[in-house]
């Protein structure tokens, strides 16, 4: 049995939140609550990819609902859910990233800690940066006999259809689609393609 709990807080007041919610907030979370959606438009700097700046600008121009997600008995994690495609952003957490995270992805996780494309019970989005694990440790089926060892592939991005984009410590990467790996030449380009499609109202 696995239990997923979601709580939505309307017009949040940090001091009035129950302890189990307030205790998991970072300084950035508090700033996002105090300053409202406009805070998100300030997260990406001029060196950030244009698609990231565009996503955060859209978030900053609207409203959000504050949601807390707990899965499998873990502490709650706050998400700011925006009308933009119903997507939700969790800000970076204090736990360190894996040492083998590619440089471009390390920079991305320094701005947003996770991205949920739609509902918490659906596929799609940027996996929480502090929870990344190899495929071999998370129970996703991979067809045997392939050229990529599942223990060396770390999924970090998922499409709405369930395909997983993985990086490898050697600098390579691949999509896992229907249990089979499809190598990619440029991981950063694939991430950009995913978010650009969302901005255009479509999916990859």
Image (cartoon, rainbow, N blue to C red):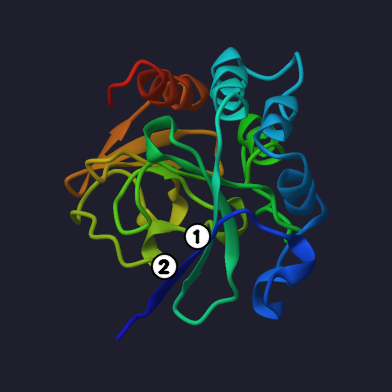
Q: Residue 204: where, in percent of width, then height? A: 28, 26
Residue closer to the observer: 174 or 64: 64
Q: Answer with the quarter of the image where residue 173 lies.
A: top left
From the top left corner, tell me how far across and down residue 175 is, in percent.
32, 37
Label 1 – label 2 distance at C-alpha: 6 Å
Residue at the spot x=55%, y=42% of the render?
64
The outermost residue toward the front is 11
Q: Residue at x 79, y 46 (%)?
A: 31
**x, y percentage for residue 14?**
76, 62
Q: Which residue has dot 1 on it?
A: 133
In this rendering, does residue 167 appear at all?
no
Determine if residue 77 is in view.
yes
Secondary structure of the residue carrying tag 1 is: loop
* Residue under label 2: 137
- Label 1: how many Cα within 10 Å (few below 14, some 14–19, many 20+): some
Please say if the residues under marks 1 and 2 sit with CB atoms less than 8 Å apart: yes
Q: How many marks?
A: 2
Q: Is residue 126 left or right of residue 197?
A: right
Please provide percent x and percent y for residue 201: 32, 21
């Amino acid at each position: 049995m696995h239990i997923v709990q979601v709580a939505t807080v309307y017009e949040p007041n940090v001091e009035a939140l129950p302890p189990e919610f307030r205790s998991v907030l970072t300084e950035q979370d508090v700033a996002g609550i105090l300053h409202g959606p406009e805070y998100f438009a300030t997260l990406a700097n001029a060196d950030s990819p244009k698609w990231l700046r565009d996503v955060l600008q859209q978030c900053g121009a609207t409203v959000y609902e504050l949601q807390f997600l707990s899965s499998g008995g873990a502490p709650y994690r706050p998400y700011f859910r925006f009308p933009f495609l119903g997507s939700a952003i969790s800000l970076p957490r204090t736990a360190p990233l894996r040492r083998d995270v590619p440089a471009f992805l390390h920079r991305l996780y320094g701005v947003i800690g996770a991205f949920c494309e739609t509902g918490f019970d659906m596929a799609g989005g940027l996996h929480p940066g502090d929870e990344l694990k190899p495929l071999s440790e998370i129970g996703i089926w991979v067809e045997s006999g392939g050229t990529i060892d599942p223990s060396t592939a770390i999924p970090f991005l998922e499409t709405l259809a369930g395909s997983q984009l993985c990086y490898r410590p050697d600098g390579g990467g691949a999509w896992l689609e229907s249990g089979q790996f499809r190598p990619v030449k440029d991981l950063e380009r694939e991430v950009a393609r995913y978010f650009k499609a969302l901005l255009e109202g479509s999916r990859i």
